[in-house]
Image (tube, helix red, strand yellow):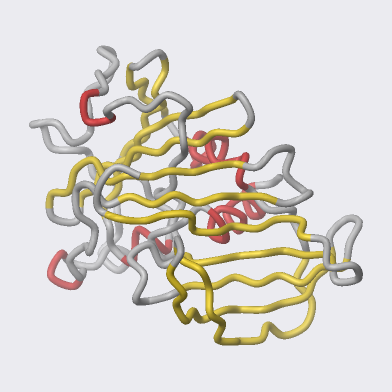
Amino acid sequence: MNAKNARFAITLCALSLSALIFWNGCAATEKKGTEDLPIAEEKPRVNSDEPAKETPQTESAAPSADANPATKYRKGDYIRYQYQGSALAHPVTLDEKILSQEGNKLEIHVRASRADEMREWVQVVTDTPHNQANNIIDGLFEVVNGKRVFLENKDNRDVYRLYEWTFPPPFNPEGKPESVTQSVDLGGEQQEAQCTKMKGKSATNSVVALFCTSSSFLWTNAYAQIADEEDGDVLWEMVVVEAGDGEP
């Protein structure tokens, strides 16, 4: 998958905060208190007492702080997504949890599991429309043997690798997308969502894709599906299993 397709895939599945690759986590077979995770000694935490290095921005590209609405996320907010379908090697469970919130700066713990495999990481982001639109991550740490190991994440390659289990099958959209309103299940609660429906061609299938968001849902991304147009086989699907403001 090239960088363009990877960004498209992440936007469709893993990005809970409106459109960004930095929110999404995973279920582990053995839970551990993420607030107590130690930090790898070779690199400091981004949200330590020392100020984080800011990504260089041009004056036109970086809105002022006053122009950015305050984040709606708070420490303890969490969501669990399930990814499934015949195009995935195994179903994937993703849990994400806000570990800390200072202004618009968020630290998110992410955990992904499938079969007997697990990936765990922490991403630090500043929740602004500009950063969401440009997939900007302030800091990325993979959790290895209980310690945070700093990742360079050049061109977002490391975060793509961490999220790759959830990627939908690539396809080329055809025709004009259709906007529809649909009721979706958000962890047992039905809610109206705004959806984009489109047709496309994959390497082997003609597909119908549906991507749903809800502005009243904290995590924005509410449901998504890609299915074979001819026989209806679900190739890839993302559903909300649970969301709240405590341990999932």
In the image, what residue occupies the spot 88% across and 55% down? 203
Percent across and percent down for residue 161 are 57, 35
Image quadrant assignment for residue 100: top left
Q: Nearer the viewer, residue 138 or 203?
A: 203
| Residue drawn at the location 29% of the way across and 16% of the way down | 40
From this view, report whether residue 70 is shown above or below residue 83. below
- Give the side of residue 56 with respect to residue 142, left or right: left
Q: How many marks?
A: 0
Please tell me which residue lies in front, 131 or 25.
25
Which quadrant of the figure contains the C terminus?
A: top left
Which quadrant would the N terminus be assigned to in this image? top right
| In this rendering, position of residue 123 left or right of residue 52 | right
> Which residue sits at x=24%, y=67%?
63
Q: Is residue 98 above or below residue 60?
A: above
Q: From the viewer's perspective, is 203 left or right of 38?
A: right
The residue sitting at 22% across, 39% down in the picture is 53
Residue 178: image x %, image y %?
66, 86
* Rendering coords of residue 129 (x, y %): 33, 67
Q: As drawn, which residue projects farthest toward the front?
A: 188
Of the pair 190 and 102, the residue shown nearer to us: 190
Q: Is residue 177 left or right of residue 22?
A: right
Between 190 and 152, the residue placed more toward the observer is 190
User: Eyeballing the image, is 141 above or below 181?
Assistant: above
Residue 130 lies, in percent from the top left, at: 34, 64
